[in-house]
Structure formats: structure tokens, C-alpha cells
Image (tube, rainbow, N blue to C red):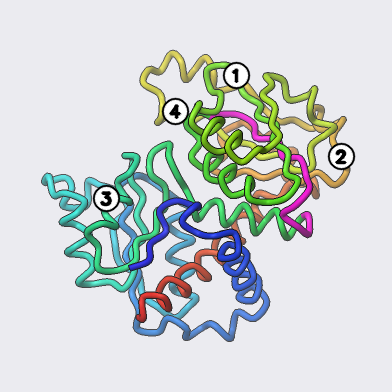
Amino acid sequence: MRHLIDIRDLTHAEILSLLDLADDIAARREDYREACRYKKLATLFFEPSTRTRLSFEAAMMELGGNVLGFSEAASSSASKGESVADTVRVVGCYADIIAMRHPKEGAPLAASLHSTVPIINAGDGGHNHPTQTLTDLMTIRREKGSLNNFTIGLCGDLKFGRTVHSLIAALTRCEGVRFVCISPEELRLPGYVRQDVLEKAGAEYAEVRGLAEVMPELDVLYMTRVQRERFFNEEDYLRLKDSYILTPAKLAGAKAELSILHPLPRVNEIDTAIDADPRACYFRQTLCGKFVRMALILTLLKEAGK
């Protein structure tokens, strides 16, 4: 049974194939209206979500399928102490494919070991978020025309940011991508990402504290929020939450063709005045998320023979 738990579960060629399929779906949506007729997607979200959960649901509905599931742990049997393994065994009797979000790192992987249907990791703690990475890659390729030879700035919470960790893992497979990691000392990339991903791949990267000093060299700026839910104490969160706020003034030295991405939700790290700037890609990025999830659902169901 094929699952998607980590973006590295996919080869680079498979990623490009998924992006090609997503582009085709976006261009010929009517041709896919019945592709998942009579199929069911279960969304098991043990942690709150808006974009990811709704985009999975919209993706399955646009493919002609149906959706069932829950949007918080309290509304599931997890509140009674049921294990993740038992939950997926049961849900696999009702659905053809499962999208799971869980606050604990490794929970979707554990689920996949017991599931009779494909599991898609929709985010596990501060670890991985592979479908957001596919969304990011589709957006970058559409905006820049290629996934090769550009400089990307990753700004904000790089320690707990699962979207950042997954995106780095994917982009280290591309040619000529340079990484600039912009964060306060307390929110730097974890050592395992630097050593096991960036350095192992021989990728060029720099770690800096200031955004303004590197802005002129960036082709892509990937903003992230400081995540309250990942902190052990409120004091540290309040001290760091406004570390980096992107304003029109800070874009003064940026390239005219800069692409600004954000996995959302936004709190205050991007001034709303930037929304009208043509370099702001984050709402176009959200739409890409639906198309890549449609492509992924189709691909995994086909490989499972369903």
C-alpha cells in the first residue's frame, strides 16, 4: 500500500509528474469531474485546520467523490482513548483513502503501518507537511517557470515550521537552489535539517537574523508565522511572535520579480497592504493546493487499484 508521509517518499520524477497532473487538472477541470465517482475520502484531523482540510474536501468533491471525517480530536473516539492504529483500521472499512493531521510527530506514519487504504500526512506536529510542499512547488514553478536556479529566503519560525522542513527536503533535489534561512536564534532550523538535509545534499545555504540585508538577493520569499501552539510557555511566544513582519517599506530593496509565499494562516507577519502587490502569491498558492491534492488523490487511488 502506497502512502505519502514524508515528501521524500516521492522521487523527484514522481513530484514533477504530480505537478504536471495538477497543471492538467487546473487547465481541464471538467475532464476530471467524475474521476473519483463513488470513492470516499476520510479526513481525520486531530488538530485544527482550515485550508488543508477544506482543500482536501474540495479536491475530492471536484473529482466527483464524497467526504467523511472529523475536524478535531474531541469529536472522535480518540477522546475515549482509542489508538490511532484502531481508528485507521475502522475508517479503512468506510473510506478508500485517508488524509490525517495530528499534533504528534510520527502519528501518520504509525497509522500507515496498520491501514488498509492509502494514508496522506496532512501535517504531523513540527515534522512534515508533504501536501503543503507540493502546493509550494506548484506555486514556485508557475511563478518562476522552473524549480531550478533561484535563491529562496525562508523567514520566521524555522524551528517548528513543518512546511519549511518539507520544502527544504524537496528543493535540495533541484538544481542550483540556494537557501537563506532568516530567523531569531531561538527559532533557527533544527540541527537535523541542516546536517541531514541541507549539508548532506551539498546545498548552498546561509543563516541570518535580518531580513532587510538579504532582501535584494531573493527570488522567492517564504514567510511563516510564529506558531503559538508549538511553544511550551506563553512568555517565549510573546517575545518572538513579532520578530519579522513584512511591510511595503521592507520590500523597497526587493526584486521586481520576487515571489512572496506563505503557507497560511497569516497572523501579522505580512502587512495586509502587501496583498495588492503582484508579487504576493499566497492566495494563488492556496488555489494550487486544491489542484495538487486532486492529483495526489487520483495517483494514490490508482496505485492502490481502487
Amino acid, disc 3: Ala
Residue picked out by circle 4:
228
Tell me, for residue 184, which label it has, or none: 1
Percent x, y for residue 237? 47, 20
Q: Is residue 191 left or right of residue 154?
A: left
Q: Can you say which quadrant of the picture contains the C terminus? A: bottom left
Magenta residues span: 144-158
Q: Comparing marks 3 and 4, which lies closer to the viewer?
A: 3
**First in sequence: mark 1 vs mark 3:** 3
Q: Position of residue 6 (x, y in %)?
A: 45, 51
Which residue is rendered at x = 45% and y = 59% of the image? Answer: 54
- Judging by the rendered image, the residue that carries numbered circle 2 is 255
Contact flag, marks 2 and 4 (Cβ < 8 Å): no
Q: Is residue 262 left or right of residue 148?
A: left
Residue 185: image quadrant is top right
Secondary element at tag 1? loop
What separation in Å lies between label 2 and label 4 (alpha carbons)?
31 Å
Residue at screen point 61% across, 41% down: 201
Secondary structure, mark 4, is helix
Circle 4: is it few (<14), some (14-19), or many (20+) Cα within 10 Å?
some
Characterize the local packing of mark 3: few (<14), some (14-19) or many (20 or more) Cα atoms within 10 angstroms.
Answer: some
Which amino acid is tagged 4? Answer: Arg
Mark 2 burial class by Cα count in 10 Å: few <14, some 14-19, many 20+: some
Residue 146 left/right relative to 136: right
Q: Is 224 situated above or below 24?
A: above
Disc 3 element = helix
Q: Which mark is residue 110?
A: 3
